Image (cartoon, rainbow, N blue to C red):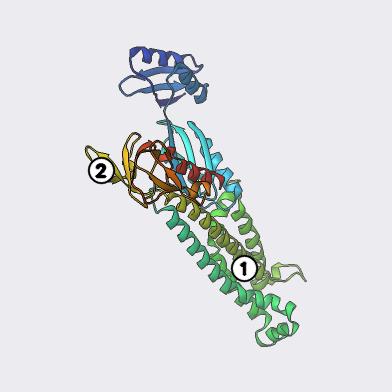
Amino acid sequence: MSKIELQIQGLSCAGCVRRAEAAIVGVSGARDVSVNLATKRASLELGTAGLDEVTQALAKAGYPARIENAVFVIEGMSCASCVGRVEAAVRALDGVNEANVSFAAGELRVRYLERVVSEADIITAVRSAGYAAEQKGAGPSAAERRAEEIRGLKQSFIIALVLALPVFLLEMGGHLYPPFHHWVMANVGMQASWVFQFVLTSAVLIGPGRKFYTVGLPLLLKGAPDMNSLVAVGTMAAYAYSAIATFAPSWLPSGTRAVYFEAAAVIVTLILLGRYLEARAKGRAGEAIAKLVELAPTRVEVKRGEGFEEADISDVIVGDMLRLRPGARVPVDGSVARGESHVDESMLTGEPLPLRKSEGDALIAGTVNGAGALEMLAEKVGADTVLAGIVRTVEEAQ
């Protein structure tokens, strides 16, 4: 048996309490059911019955459990299997109704039962799967994180390239230009060449390539390997064999002594290059969303009493009267209440010619007012506007 608390909607009287309690009691395995009208909270002990059955019973009775929505920023994902692993870890939590990861945006969107699951529980589940997580808005902005990721990957790639290039030339240069091999053997020597390759490859793996091991090996030990695990195992095998061939050749059968330092170094370098290019591509996709968001102004003129006052866009509610000066962007969806003008709706329709707007005509957030002054009635604000819907669709499509 486990103790469960649910936040319930729709309770208004003692009769509602009795009906909600009866709905929960009717679920097999639910015991010690108590519904508090003041806190609008149900507490119960749950046995064999699933939490889904309790929430379905409450919804059927007209008292649905309160659902919360949260967005988390996920770091460390490198491929599609990472997405599935994060989603599976979060969906395994009792009380999570839905969990979806956007790999391009690096975000996790969760719908969960209030009080049954907390943000801390979700973050813990993500971390247990091997990835870093924090609630969106708690740290740097998405643009700042993307820029930092791109800078870090670019720096790691350049360092790895500088270190790996001599290793590659020493080992493979003789295949491309045979006289070079003879020069290395005569002036450097095979053993000295291998020791030099060992030092440079060690620097590549410990420095730029460290993340492959700190992320990939723990996941491998958990039985849930990802791409980092593949790179870690492959490069470690090449590196370890080469190190034995360099410093303990007697451990190897006769005729099998060879080094593959260049394989380990080049693999890490090329994977870092791929991730750098991928981060740049994701960054450009993020910039497209940012440009869409910027289409809506952050400050608006709202009618308060007999005059208009400047206010934040978040303070606008349905029914407010707004004033649009010539050249201003429409802040929310609504209709013209007074005045005439031409409005550029090319961002939405692609139509190059501004459209004439007069009393009663619709206005869409993000479009641009022309030379005339308008007063408009706010009809859709926040996430309900057409512009917000476009941004949401682009995010989901990524």
- Taking the spot 43% from the left edge, 13% from the top edge, the residue there is 22
Tag 2 residue: 308
The answer to which image quadrant residue 16 occupies is top left
- Can you give x and y, in whole percent of width and height, for residue 53 in the image? 51, 21
Q: Secondary structure under badge 2? A: strand
Q: Is residue 35 above or below residue 342?
A: above
Mark 2 to mark 1 CA distance (whole Å): 65 Å
- Can you give x and y, in whole percent of width and height, for residue 27 in the image? 50, 16
Label 2 with label 1: CB-CB less than 8 Å:
no
Q: In this view, does 55 lie above or below 370?
A: above
Between label 2 and label 1, give the one nearer the viewer: 2
In primary-sequence order, the first of circles 2 and 1 is 1
Q: Can residue 67 be seen in this view?
A: yes
Residue type of the residue flagged with mark 2: Phe
- Taking the spot 38% from the left edge, 21% from the top edge, the residue there is 10
- Can you give x and y, in whole percent of width and height, for residue 159 in the image? 53, 71
Query: What crowding class fits label 1: few (fewer than 14 Cα within 10 Å), some (14-19), or many (20 or more)?
Result: many
Residue type of the residue flagged with mark 1: Ala
Q: In this view, does 367 lie above or below 11?
A: below
Tag 1 residue: 265
